[in-house]
Image (cartoon, rainbow, N blue to C red):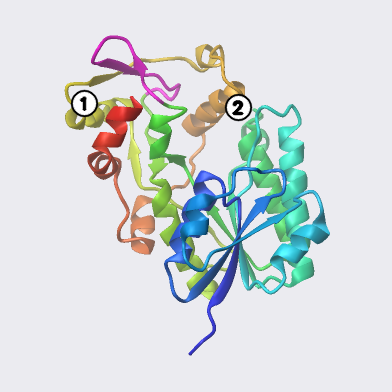
Amino acid sequence: MAQPLIITVFGATGSQGGAVARTLARDPKIRVRAVTSTHDSNRPQQLVQNEGVDVRQCNLDDVYSIKMALDGTDACFLVTYTDFKDPSCKENEIRQGRLIADACAMAGVKHVVFSTQLHAKRMLGIEVRHLDAKAEIEDYLYEKKLPLTCIMVPCYYEEFMGLFRPDQVDQHEYRLSLPIGQAPLDMICIDNIGDVVRKIFLCRDMYLNKTVSVCGDKLTIREIAQILTTHLKPKTFKEKQISVNDYKMLDFPGVRDWANMFYFFCRVDQRYNVASTRQMNPNLLSFEDWVRQNVDVLHKAL
């Protein structure tokens, strides 16, 4: 019987990394090593509860500490985090990404799957730090000549319970305000990302040196509002147009980056493909599927 593939997951305390780790852990052909930062006191309890998940802490500012976490691993999934509360978030994200790349090279990791994005500054001249940082880390991974596959992930459905949460204007009346006009928003369920990443790892040669752009649905804000209204009665949802400049006036960390991101999305084809994603993950959920499955959770969140 073949030895299980040992896959190290960075960013395992986050939404995307945690979803990937949980999915991989359910496959008996894979052993998951989930890496968390020594500065992160919130240990990933859901991962610990999954049989076979080896949770390790390391100093992400120390290449030798990272290499120790990687020793003996066959492959690695990497998603980096942009801490908008940190004025130097872009530089610090790039630095940690490069250190992990250096450690992967030192440890002889045979396959790295990196969650990347397009570089808005280069392509359109506007700064979107959480996109640009990942694009620059991708450049460095290729410079290191690592065996690489990139995955490009759009917005999560789950953001409509968080950052994209509709504004309540009356007892049962809500408004959705995102500065994207009539352009469709590319989205995916967080948990659907894991099955795509699993296929990439298990079919390494097929995806090596490629970028896979995943997507679960493409909908306008008006279409999203209609779906929420259909399934979350008596609540009703309507689109409220907002400009990029007005969105920048909102008060939350990284608001200018998010506003610029929507501007970028409206003007540059992100290459997300629902059909090819469904081929990789036949259980891919549309936005309406996801809403239908999460009615109670959405009611509580809103």
Which residue bears the numbered disc 1?
229
Residue 196 is situated, as x and y percent measured from the top left of the image, at: 44, 60
Q: In this rendered view, identify the residue nearer to me: 283 or 86.
A: 86
The residue located at (33%, 57%) in the rendering is 278
Q: Position of residue 115 (x, y in %)?
A: 57, 51
Residue 163 coordinates in the image, percent (x, y): 47, 27
Q: Amino acid at mark 2?
A: Asp
Could you tell me how far apart the alpha carbons at marks 2 and 1 are, in whole angstroms?
Answer: 29 Å
Q: Quadrant of residue 167?
A: top left
Q: Confirm or deny contact between disc 2 and disc 1 (CB under 8 A).
A: no
Quarter of the rendering occupied by the C terminus: top left
Q: Helix, strand or loop at disc 2? A: helix
Left or right of residue 282: residue 199:
right
Query: Which quadrant of the figure has residue 235?
Result: top left
Image: 6 above or below 288: below
Q: Is residue 78 magenta?
A: no
Q: Which residues are magenta?
A: 165-181
Using a 10 Å C-alpha cutoff, classify the residue at mark 2 as few (fewer than 14 neighbours), some (14 to 19) or many (20 or more): some
Q: Secondary structure at mark 1?
A: helix
Residue 277: mark? none
In the rendered view, does 293 fall on the left or right side of 244? left
Residue occupied by mark 2: 257
Q: Main secondary structure of the magenta part?
A: loop
